[in-house]
Image (spheres, rainbow, N blue to C red):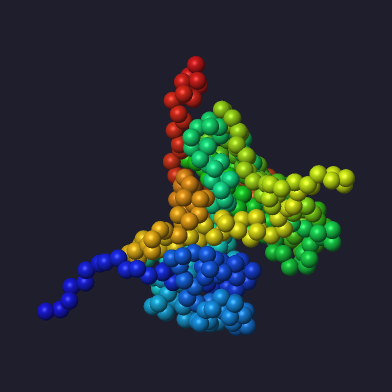
Amino acid sequence: MTYLHHPVEEERPVRIAVIGAGWIGKFHAESIARRIPNARLEAIVDPVLSAAQELATTLGTSKISTDVADVLADPDIDAVLIASPLRFHAELITAAAHAGKDIFCEKPGGRTVAELDAAIHAAASAGVVLRFGFNRRYSSDFAAARRLIDDGTVGTPQLLRSLTRDPGTEAGLSNPERIAPGTIFLETLIHDFDTLNWLNPGAIPVKVHAVADALVAPGAKAGGLLDTAVVTVTYSNGAIAVAEANFNALYGYDVRGEVFGSAGMVIAGTPQATNATSYTATGIASETSRLNIRLFHDAYTAELAAFADDVAARRGYAPEGTTAAASFAAVAASPVAAPGGVDARNALAVALAAFKSAQTGLPVEVSEIAVLQAAEQARALPSRLLQGAEA
């Protein structure tokens, strides 16, 4: 007779290959290698061999390549982390799905909704895990804000706000001509759009109006640069949201969110690096963060810990003691699942609508970009609030 294969849990780490050895790829690779107990950095891929070699030497990884096909064909690799430039995201998701690899992709998942849809379909057909890098959901203060919304503390969301101000210098932007048109919407504000969608559960964005300009580097506007933007988003539940961004905040990296509702308000985020504040003859001061990987250090790590747990669960790997995500309070307390295809699609649709609105100067119906669905159900208000509304 022949053996019958009986599924059993296997104790082994989730083996992940990082595609892209740029600044965010390096940080993610370090998190996998050093901070996530049930994951192992199995390989590094970058078209620049020296970049892969340098990172591999630092982190003690033996497998490096300039060809993604190598990791997709490697049976020892469970998952890939895509940290390549945006133009490659969708095709890499599709290729990894066809190879049976679980996937974590930095945002956004594609340049167009159609491109992203094809990638999402490939992952769903293959039955692999697909997650996207919307790290603010894993920040302890943003997660706490979402719990308060779920608990009914703010009632029905009516006004929402999210902002991103990148750290800058008095010299302004370095090489602004190299910033692709639409970057402020597709790669910066897309975080704010996901945050607003997530903090207004059950609602979908229906109309977008954007105003944008090159105020930091006006000389680069002719080449398509937009470095300052304000976007208004109207939701299906009537809530109105504002997202804003600027590429040159001299005081540091500033990310904040706010939800005002029928019963109260909740805010999240601060540019301060610590709670320590100095009081001297020169005034009152506190240190601020100058890098996103510092401001969101734990959130970046936590999102990968949650991904590793999802991959381990799908593949039947027994957790070693505790799950990786349980090591991070932000994840353990997070009220919703990690951002998947619907979340990525909704945020991208808003970003594309905002880009179109900025170009035309007119409001854009999101349905012109894509027909959306809510990523989750709306939360029911506690009876005490419903009774107050009826009164």
Camera-nearest residue between 127 and 115: 127
Q: Position of residue 141 (x, y in %)?
A: 58, 45
The part of the image, by quadrant, that contains residue 84 is bottom right
Residue furthest to the right: 281
Residue at x-position 44% and y-position 76%: 72
> Relative to 339, is 267 above or below?
above
Camera-nearest residue between 213 and 385: 385
The part of the image, by quadrant, that contains residue 133 is bottom right
Q: Position of residue 391 (x, y in %)?
A: 50, 16
Whether residue 31 is visible: yes
Q: Position of residue 17 (x, y in %)?
A: 49, 73
Q: How many numbered callouts?
A: 0
> Relative to 169, is 257 above or below?
above
In the visual, does 334 lie left or right of 161? left
Q: Which corner quadrant holds the N terminus?
A: bottom left
The part of the image, by quadrant, that contains residue 241 is top right
Residue at x-position 52% and y-position 57%: 302
Residue at x-position 78% and y-position 52%: 251
Q: Position of residue 181 (x, y in %)?
A: 70, 61
Residue furthest to the top: 391
In the visual, does 228 lie left or right of 157? right
Residue at x-position 75% and y-position 60%: 225
Whether residue 116 is visible: no
